[in-house]
Image (cartoon, helix red, strand yellow):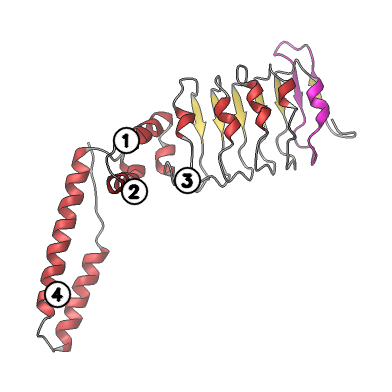
Amino acid sequence: AQRGKKMIYNPKGERGRFLILSKNEIVDFPNEIQSLVCLEKLELNQNQIRVIPEGVFSHLSRLKHLRLNNNRLGALPRDLAACHNSLQYLNISNNLFRTFPQPVLQLARLQELHVQNNALRQLPRELFQGQSLKMFKANGNPLREPPSEVCAGGIRQIQNYFSQLQHSSGQEDKRVKTMFLGASLAGKHDIMTKITAMLAERKSNLTHFIHNLEGIEEPEFYVDQWERLKEMESCTLTVGLR
């Protein structure tokens, strides 16, 4: 720990060995932590840490609980995977992650993961293929895959999302499912039926619109048809799934 900073260290407590260095304005990750080989709980949240050097977590194979939230991190060291059989709780919310940190995918016993309020646009399918993860929070990210609405529904809904994409046929079908899945768990048969019907109706309306314009020179007629076209284009598709 850095000199003059608040530190709570319990080497033999009833709740296990832990080190708390929260709210200390720490900028440089304290490398001395790697000597605490029996550490089970580490809290470094609410500091100013930008980088965690490689080689620290390879000495912390018993670590179960790790809080790194509210720092300035954009990546995690590869050797975090050394905690794959121990780490159960990880909080990296309120940082600067733009891509999902790949070492997290190696944490086979992770039960609770917090990644809120970063800059993540995509989550890896592999994160939700195991059975260990019980709680996942990702609100406050500009997510596109899965959409934020899907993530708000919890782990099972995210798993359903990836399952639907995996079994969809064709790129066009995949884009349609992705577009609607966030709000309504797309992938069911009736959504495609309704989309097909909507497109057929719009094609018919546009054909009729073009036909009406041919040979007409009255300005009022064009204004009327223009208003109708804008009305058609502003219509939204409401899909109700059972």
Tell which circle, 3 or 2, labels the residue nearer the N-terminal end: 3
Q: Position of residue 135 (x, y in %)?
A: 50, 27
Q: Along the polypeptide, which appears first: circle 1 or circle 3?
A: 3
The amino acid type, in three-letter code, at marker 1 is Gln
Q: Which residue is mark 3?
A: 143
Residue linked to disc 1: 164
Q: Marks 3 and 2, Cα distance to the nearest angstrom?
A: 13 Å
Kind of residue indicated by mark 3: Leu
Q: In 3D space, how far apart are the residues under numbered discs 1 and 3 (Cα atoms)? A: 18 Å
Q: Which mark is residue 179?
A: 2
Q: Nearer the viewer, mark 3 or mark 4?
A: 4
Q: Are marks 3 and 2 in contact (CB under 8 Å)?
A: no
Secondary element at tag 4: helix
Q: Are marks 2 and 4 in contact (CB under 8 Å)?
A: no
Q: For the C terminus, which image quadrant? A: top left
The stretch in magenta equals 10-35
Mark 3 or mark 4: which comes first in sequence? Answer: 3
Residue 12 highlighted magenta (yes or no): yes
Picture coordinates of residue 241, whole percent (x, y):
23, 40
Q: Which residue is label 4 attached to?
A: 210
